[in-house]
Amino acid sequence: MTDATKSATLTIDGNAYELPMYSPTSGPDVVDIRKLYAQAGVFTYDPGFTSTASCDSTITFIDGDKGELLHRGYPIDQLAAKSHYLEVCYLLLYGELPSAKDLEVFESTITRHTMIHEQMHNFFRGFRRDAHPMATMVGVVGAMSAFYHDSTDISDERQREIASHRLIAKMPTIAAMAYKYSVGQPFVYPRNDLDYAANFLHMCFAVPAEEYVVDPILARAMDRIFTLHADHEQNASTSTVRLASSSGANPFACIAAGIACLWGPAHGGANQACLEMLKEIGTPDRIPEFIARAKDKNDPFRLMGFGHRVYKNFDPRATVMKQSADEVLELLGVENNPILQVAKELETAALNDPYFADKKLFPNVDFYSGIILEAMGFPTSMFTPIFAVSRTVGWISQWKEQLADPQMKIGRPRQLYQGSVTRDYIDIENR
Ligand code: CMC
């Protein structure tokens, strides 16, 4: 934490309270209200954390007005174009781009942790075949704490490191197994001769009956999807991981909590919901009907893949994703994809509509990702698990940062109580 640069004065009932303020390296100044309750006996009220910084961090920065996303200072479009997922993982975890030697060691470490304990296979088999892969992942990742006791002691730095590597390495294996289980196919073991993205595709799409050769173009597209989702500052699932970790919970339990939060349609579940919406629209002539529904206050329908708490401009990940959708579909020979056509026309219609313009609602990362994933052969139920695989490094980096922070305290928000005041218990016969 830097020293206070200035202060703000809050006056309550004629009493003035001086609150320190800090200036970040980028972004708006923050007012420090940590001592406010002790000094003034009042809380602040901010459901949804729309004006609250919950921690200080050096990992990711978003300028929502400019549509800028930086990891450790590097713009996401440069990372998507020039880097690759495991290098971005290293950057997020350790703060700097790796040397060639450091990268080699890191890649080798991750590659050698990709298998899961054989007994975990039995754990998968306890789920129903029709379970959503996210349901399976929440359970299996939580259960990792029962299989990897030797990396659950959060006070041991080496154990924290091993847990980080295990989670990044095993998450694709777990997601692929959840998929294989749901389609009734045998699990496919990881292969150390393949890179991270190619290995994931192999574990998802190979079958014992024939050879599966990973298309390098698809592997590159997969890697880019992983890269674009790697971290996103203090979003809902990351904040969930931090909150779970603040009690001292083990890393596998914390990441399972993050996966659970990611699942919802307002967050990581939007990619599945978006593709389902595009299919429901089906043809461009139905776009006005869905735009009208999204604008109707009495209709709960929202344009999935549109809007963001922080971005009030284009989500820079959506821009890369849109280009990627064009490239991947062309390379796969999927010409004139009707869903891509609906997506593009829907985007244009929404951007030209005053409702979306006034509220600064732009396409987010989920608007085009589902189109690519479907073209690659994934069912919609796998879209959010793929987001979870990608985001694991972000959760882990933020978890590590929090544990290393000497100011870390258990997260314990307060409330604006609106319930009954004290009243006496009434015996049942008198109610
Ligand atoms: N369609 C129609 N109206 C919308 C939409 C939308 N997609 N998003 C926001 N609005 C309206 C909303 O009704 C509200 O209107 P009013 O001010 O008149 O009440 C206004 O815009 C502000 O919305 P909000 O819900 O207060 O904004 P928020 O910051 O709490 O929510 C959001 C952000 C992402 C949850 C929301 O935009 C949304 O539900 N979008 C659709 C789901 C989606 O695509 N989620 C993926 C987010 S990006 C991936 C990730 O990081 O998880």
Image: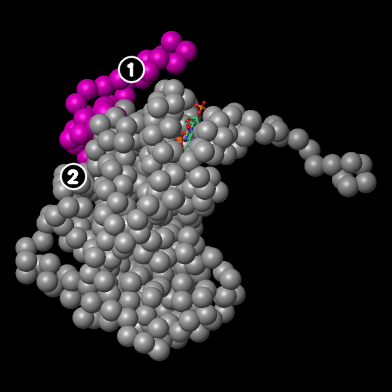
The span shown in magenta is 1-30
The answer to which quarter of the image holds residue 188 is bottom left
Whether residue 204 is visible: yes
Seen at 16% across and 48% down, the residue is 78
Seen at 23% across and 81% down, the residue is 192
Q: Residues within 10 Å of mark 2 (few under 14, many from 20)?
A: some
In this figure, which residue is indicated by the disc labeled 2?
Answer: 75
In this figure, which residue is indicated by the disc labeled 1?
Answer: 9
Q: Position of residue 20 (x, y in %)?
A: 27, 26
Q: Does label 1 or label 2 sit earlier along the sequence?
A: 1
Left or right side of 230 for 255: right
Q: Position of residue 429 (x, y in %)?
A: 93, 46
Q: Which quadrant is home to the N terminus?
A: top left
The answer to which quarter of the image holds residue 118 is bottom left
Whether residue 113 is visible: no
What amino acid type should be assigned to the residue bearing mark 1?
Answer: Thr
Between 200 and 258, the one nearer to me in the picture: 200
